[in-house]
Amino acid sequence: MENSRDGQVTELLRKLFPRTGQAFVIGVTGSPGSGKSTLVDQLAHHYKDSETKVGIVLVDPTSPFSGGAILGDRIRMQSLFTDPRVFIRSMATRGKMGGLSTAVDEALMVLDAAGYGTLIVETVGVGQDEVDIVKTAHMTLVVLVPGMGDDIQTMKAGIMEIGDIFVINKADRDGINRTERELEALLSLSSREDGWEPPIVKTVATQGEGILELVEGIEKYRDLLSEPQSKKRREVPWFRERLVEKLRDHLTRDLLERIPEEELDRYAEKMMTRELDPYTIMDRLLKNLDR
Amino acid sequence: MENSRDGQVTELLRKLFPRTGQAFVIGVTGSPGSGKSTLVDQLAHHYKDSETKVGIVLVDPTSPFSGGAILGDRIRMQSLFTDPRVFIRSMATRGKMGGLSTAVDEALMVLDAAGYGTLIVETVGVGQDEVDIVKTAHMTLVVLVPGMGDDIQTMKAGIMEIGDIFVINKADRDGINRTERELEALLSLSSREDGWEPPIVKTVATQGEGILELVEGIEKYRDLLSEPQSKKRREVPWFRERLVEKLRDHLTRDLLERIPEEELDRYAEKMMTRELDPYTIMDRLLKNLDR
């Protein structure tokens, strides 16, 4: 049984759901210090002027290595905080159930239903959590900076899959040419099923340079996605993954509500003394719960 | 129902469990490029000579931003690969169920039962996944390098909780004094319940400098942990968390085995067209499964 607050939230989301599906969701990720926030700020300014309202979800999975960075970064965004066409929501909580991407998903759903036409999800840091989150977006911008040197090699492994556009920000810095060449070389090694060739866009976000070119790239990809065939090929697995995630969250919450805290502690103590192994305990708990 | 391979693994772990609890598990984390692997290499050499066998678990949650780094880092460890007193296991797979920390936990259990007295878990990258993993260790070394500048401020938020010893590696580099002062200032702000004051140890891992001092710090903390009171205070919540994790993994696997792939796809398509919302689908699926 869900508690009543959860029940109310679910009822709300259930009612909102048919009104979702209009917004375009842009994920932005990249190393700390790459200027993601300034770039998001610029994109938000562009979109709020050119069409519907803009929603921004800032995600920080309270990693000990990124936690403190938020404030400084986010202060730069303050020009947007008072603009009625822009809604900014910072999400830092990570539940014990690991439901952060579900929480982000729900926030996006609410903004979508409320008529925000462009949604931007920015993650701090570069862990698996962040990747899971940007996967919930329609497209992902990966932000780099010149002079990363070996770091580009380091990024090699999985970066091809998640970047739909690669932004080299702070492009007025030394090393821009080398970084661009290295990135081009890496991108040339891979080809995508959907035929899209991820462009490299150079920006100086603090000066607004390159933003229009970036927007152009975003719109091109958006057009590609809106073709019925690619929409279905992309969205069915996407929704399936969301569904499985929601089921997992639900089951875990449900389970923990049905096992008293003290019982868990008692079992934990028996594990500590090696009196019982975790598998035997699981068998007992699951049997008691009539599963 | 679990499939037979899982069942066999569970049976094995069930039998091994009573023989676990002897090993001391050291977690090592820190930014990429901080020289963690060299440090782990040095620690492994020390422990294999001084007492029982050493097990090393190298964890890389296949983050797109760290994936490629493994090889280079790990090559440096090759002197250990052929040593019978050292067992090295690299874990890069991250299951769809997010069970990486469970997998690491199980690998540690096997090594523990097999008589490896010192276990070292090294993570690549610094995301939430890594933090979850180092939490499964008895103690955690956080590795920094001089000249991180603002990065130390950035690390501020959660670092106090997870570091039991702070290692400034590459201590022969410029900026060591400033880094040390900043770190000291941060550490002075916090006090721990267990009365432990996390020391700062300076090392040049490539030269073996500072390793003995680091080992001394590790052993001091190990003594503290072995007091019966602090053992219980620490281990009961630890085992409870492991138990909940295992239950979650089990429920999710169980669920996915009972819902045909095609049924999930069908529902995902109904979500895409907004014919059904995810909450109604969940109600149906859970009802069908007799929950």
Image (spheres, coloured by chain):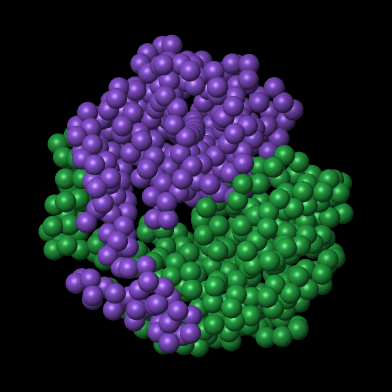
Chain colours: A green, B purple
Q: Is residue A95 above or below residue A147?
A: below
Q: For the point 39% across and 45% down, which residue is it? A: B101
Q: Can residue A117 be seen in this snapshot?
A: yes
Residue A82, x across and y down, in percent: 67, 78
* Quadrant hosting residue A211: bottom right
Q: Residue furthest top?
A: B49
Q: Nearer the viewer, residue B276 or A3?
A: B276
**Residue B240 visible here:** no
Compared with B222, B96 (above or below) is below
Q: Residue at x 43, y 87 (%)?
A: B275
Q: How many labels does the image show?
A: 0
Residue B73 location in percent, x, y?
60, 31
Q: Where is residue B132 in the image (x, y as percent from the top left)?
A: 43, 46
Question: At x 59% / y 78%, what residue is drawn?
Answer: A229
- Left or right: B157 as drawn, with respect to A190: left
Compare residues B257 and A85 and report the one nearer the observer.
B257
Q: Quadrant of residue A39?
A: bottom right
Q: Which residue is drawn at 40% across and 71% down?
A: A243
Q: Residue B171, percent across and down?
A: 66, 24
Q: In which quarter of the image is the C terminus of chain A?
A: bottom left
Q: In which quadrant is the N terminus of chain A drawn? A: bottom left
